[in-house]
Image (cartoon, rainbow, N blue to C red):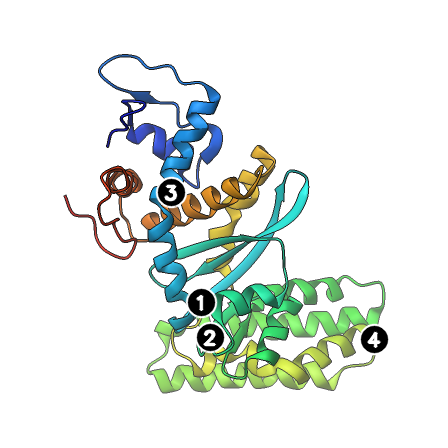
C-alpha cells in the first residue's frame, strides 16, 4: 500500500496498537516507514487517517445493508462526545460481524433507520425505552430483554430499606439463580426434552413469585414489567440460538466507552465516520479471527488503486 503524496507504509504494529479494542485508535498511526525516515505533521497524519477511513467506507456500508436481514442481533448503546455535544455510539452485534453507528439520537429512530419498519429478527437488548418503542412500531420484531439487567434491579430490591421489598427481592433472586443453574447445567441433562422441562419449571416458579408477592410500589413495578413483557424475557426458551443476556453487545461496546474517556470523543462528522468504520473493521476482524492489519492493508491498497474493496464478510486472500 503506498500513497504517492506520502510514500509511506502503515506497519502492522501501528495498526494493531492504535486501532485494536485493547489499544486506543486515534493515539497513533505514527509507526510509519518507507525506504527513509518520514516525519509527518499533525495535519498530514490527519489526512492519512481520512484516507484510511475512505478505504473502509464500502466494507462498512456492505455490513450496514445486511443488518435488516439478520435473524439475531444484540444491540447496545453508549454515550459519545463530539466537540462537547452529546452523541451515542450504537453497537449491532451479528453472528459474523459487529457494526458501530454514531448518532445524535438515542431513540427508536436509530433502530428504524438502521433496521427498518419490517425487521423480522430477534433483538437482544436491555429494557431501555427505545427498544420497547421499536417493538410497538414494528410488530414483526421479537425482543430478548437481558436477564442480567433484571438481576441488577432485583438485587436493588434485596437491599431496600423496606423489609417487604427485601423479602420480595431475595425470593426473586433465589428463583433467578435456580433458572441460571438450569441453563448452565444444560449438558448434564439426559435429553433436550428433560432440560426444557426443568427450564420451563424454573421460569414458571419465577413468574408465580413475581405476581404473588406484589405488596409495594417497587414490587408492583417489577410485576407490571413482567405482565407486559414476560415473553420478551423468555424469548430464549422458544428461539434456539438466543442468549438470555445481552453480554455479546455489552462486551463489544465496552472498549468504546474506554476510548471515549481517553480521547474525549471526536471533532466533527469526519471523525465520527472514522470511528464507526475503524471500530467496525477491527471488531469484526477479531470476531472472525482475521488479521486486522491484513484487511486494512488490502482496503487501503484497493482504494489507492481504484480497485474493488475487500469484504468484511470474505476471508483474506493474498
Residue closer to the observer: 72 or 303? 303
Label 1: how many Cα within 10 Å (few below 14, some 14–19, many 20+): many
In this figure, which residue is indicated by the disc labeled 3? 54
Numbered disc 3: secondary structure: helix
In the image, residue 40 sits, relative to residue 183, either above or below, namely above
Task: Give the residue pinned by disc 1.
Answer: 73
Label 4, label 2: how far apart the Cα atoms are: 31 Å
Residue under numbered circle 4: 217
Callout 4 crowding tier (Cα within 10 Å): few <14, some 14–19, many ≥20: few
Q: Are marks 1 and 3 in contact (CB under 8 Å)?
A: no
Q: Nearer the viewer, mark 1 or mark 4?
A: 1
Q: Earlier in the sequence, mark 4 or mark 2?
A: 2
Q: Residue at x 63, y 74 (%)?
A: 133
Position of the N terminus by quadrant: top left
Residue at 57% from the left image edge and 33% from the top image edge? 262
Classify residue 220 as left or right of residue 232: right
Q: Position of residue 164 (x, y in %)?
A: 82, 73
| Nearest to viewer (mark 1 / mark 3) | 3
Q: Which residue is mark 2?
A: 122
Q: Residues within 10 Å of mark 3 (few under 14, many from 20)?
A: some
As displayed, is residue 7 above or below residue 119? above
Residue 199: image location, x then y, percent? 48, 81
Question: What is the CA distance from the residue labelled 1 to the residue labelled 4?
Answer: 34 Å
**Percent from the top left, x then y, of residue 240?**
39, 78
Amino acid at each position: 500500500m503506498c500513497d504517492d503524496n506520502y510514500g509511506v507504509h502503515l506497519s502492522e504494529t501501528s495498526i494493531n496498537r492504535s486501532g485494536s479494542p485493547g489499544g486506543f485508535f486515534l493515539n497513533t498511526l505514527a509507526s510509519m516507514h518507507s525506504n527513509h525516515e518520514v516525519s509527518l505533521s499533525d495535519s498530514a497524519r490527519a489526512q492519512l487517517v481520512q484516507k484510511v477511513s475512505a478505504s473502509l467506507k464500502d466494507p462498512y456500508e456492505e455490513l450496514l445493508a445486511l443488518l435488516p436481514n439478520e435473524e439475531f442481533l444484540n444491540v447496545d448503546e453508549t454515550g459519545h462526545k463530539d466537540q462537547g455535544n452529546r452523541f451515542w455510539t450504537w453497537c449491532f452485534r451479528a453472528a459474523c460481524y459487529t457494526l458501530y453507528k454514531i448518532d445524535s439520537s438515542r431513540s427508536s429512530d436509530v433502530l428504524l433507520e438502521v433496521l427498518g419498519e419490517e425487521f423480522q429478527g430477534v433483538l437482544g437488548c436491555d429494557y431501555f425505552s427505545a427498544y420497547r418503542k421499536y417493538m410497538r412500531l414494528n410488530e414483526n420484531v421479537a425482543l430478548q430483554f437481558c436477564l442480567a439487567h433484571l438481576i441488577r434491579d432485583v438485587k436493588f430490591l434485596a437491599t431496600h430499606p423496606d423489609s417487604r421489598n427485601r423479602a420480595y427481592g431475595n425470593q426473586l433472586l433465589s428463583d433467578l439463580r435456580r433458572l441460571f443453574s438450569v441453563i448452565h447445567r444444560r449438558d448434564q441433562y439426559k435429553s433436550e426434552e428433560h432440560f426444557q422441562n426443568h427450564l420451563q419449571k424454573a421460569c414458571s416458579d419465577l413468574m408465580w413469585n413475581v405476581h404473588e408477592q406484589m405488596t409495594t410500589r417497587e414490587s408492583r413495578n417489577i410485576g407490571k414489567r413482567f405482565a407486559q413483557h414476560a415473553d420478551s424475557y423468555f424469548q430464549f426458551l422458544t428461539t434456539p440460538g438466543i442468549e438470555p443476556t445481552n453480554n455479546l453487545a455489552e462486551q463489544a461496546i465496552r472498549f468504546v466507552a474506554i476510548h471515549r474517556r481517553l480521547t474525549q470523543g471526536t471533532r466533527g462528522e469526519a471523525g465520527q465516520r472514522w470511528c464507526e468504520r475503524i471500530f467496525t473493521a477491527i471488531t469484526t476482524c477479531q470476531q472472525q479471527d482475521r488479521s486486522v492489519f491484513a484487511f486494512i492493508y488490502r482496503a487501503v491498497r484497493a482504494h489507492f488503486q481504484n480497485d474493488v474493496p475487500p469484504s468484511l464478510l470474505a476471508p483474506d486472500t493474498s
